[in-house]
Amino acid sequence: MRTLAFETSTAMGSVAVLEDDRLLALSELGRVQRTAQSLAPAIRSILQEANWEPSDVQLIAVTNGPGSFTGLRAGVTTAKVFAYVTGADVLALNTLQVIAAQANVTSDRLWCVMDAQRQQVFAAQFEMTDDIVPIPTVATQIIDNEAWMKLLESGDSVTGMGLSKLAEHLSTDINVVAEEAWAPQADTLGRLALAKYQSGERAHFWQLAPQYFRKSAAEEKFDQGLIK
């Protein structure tokens, strides 16, 4: 299975191409490249590196949230267009599940967090098994930093970019995953999508949509009557 994966939910995204679970090429993206217009050249470049034509891609994997509004829109839109043009299958994965899949922990309970601003995090809990796919046990939610830290139990593992502000406040009986694994990577995304695809998961590109988990600033101002 030839997979093209692009992760655009964070400030520094990435694009990867994989043959089955073997990584052929990985390219880091800057902030500017996470727009729909500039993501296309990055994809074209990495396909050329792998000596693939667009029509060679069989599966497209993309993160659909939580994450940056702009990055998620660009990634999901690009995935839909690419799938429409090439006929490739496509899967959208939760960003926190991708982070969980690369944590490499032995504890059963793993919390993944991303900064949601306003002293809050996007948080989800996963059960870690021998399978590559982490099992969600607490669905993705927005929660106050203090409230999330109170949920932690001795022996829990934690990972994710939200720890950049919180790790130093955690008790010593909490296992903090190495910082280099906190950010989601396109190669992890590709392998996780392949595992889900092989287990029978399918999606139609018209059904893809970003999962923001909160309203935009403009929507919140509208709800408050500040704009019309």
Image (cartoon, rainbow, N blue to C red):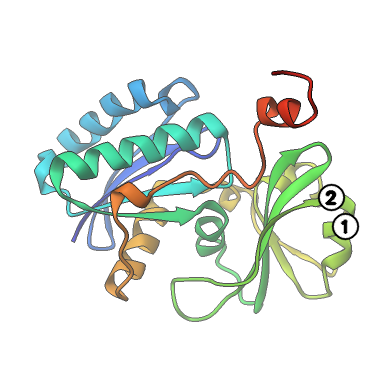
- Tell me: 135 left or right of 1: right
Q: Which residue is mark 2?
A: 144
Q: How many other residues sit within 10 Å of disc 2, few (<14), some (14-19) or many (≥20)? A: some
User: Would residue 11 be visible to someone looking at this image?
Assistant: no
The spot of residue 17 in percent (x, y) is 26, 47
Asked whether 227 or 207 is in front, the reply is 227
- Disc 2 residue type? Asp
Residue 16 vertical placement versus 41 (above, below): below
Q: Which residue is mark 1?
A: 147
Asked whether 30 or 68 is in front, the reply is 68
The spot of residue 147 in percent (x, y) is 88, 57
Residue at image coords 36%, 61% = 193
Residue at image coords 42%, 30% = 29
Asked whether 27 or 9 is in front, the reply is 9
Q: How many other residues sit within 10 Å of disc 1, few (<14), some (14-19) or many (≥20)? A: few
- Answer yes or no: do the residues labelled 2 and 1 have beta carbons within 8 Å? yes
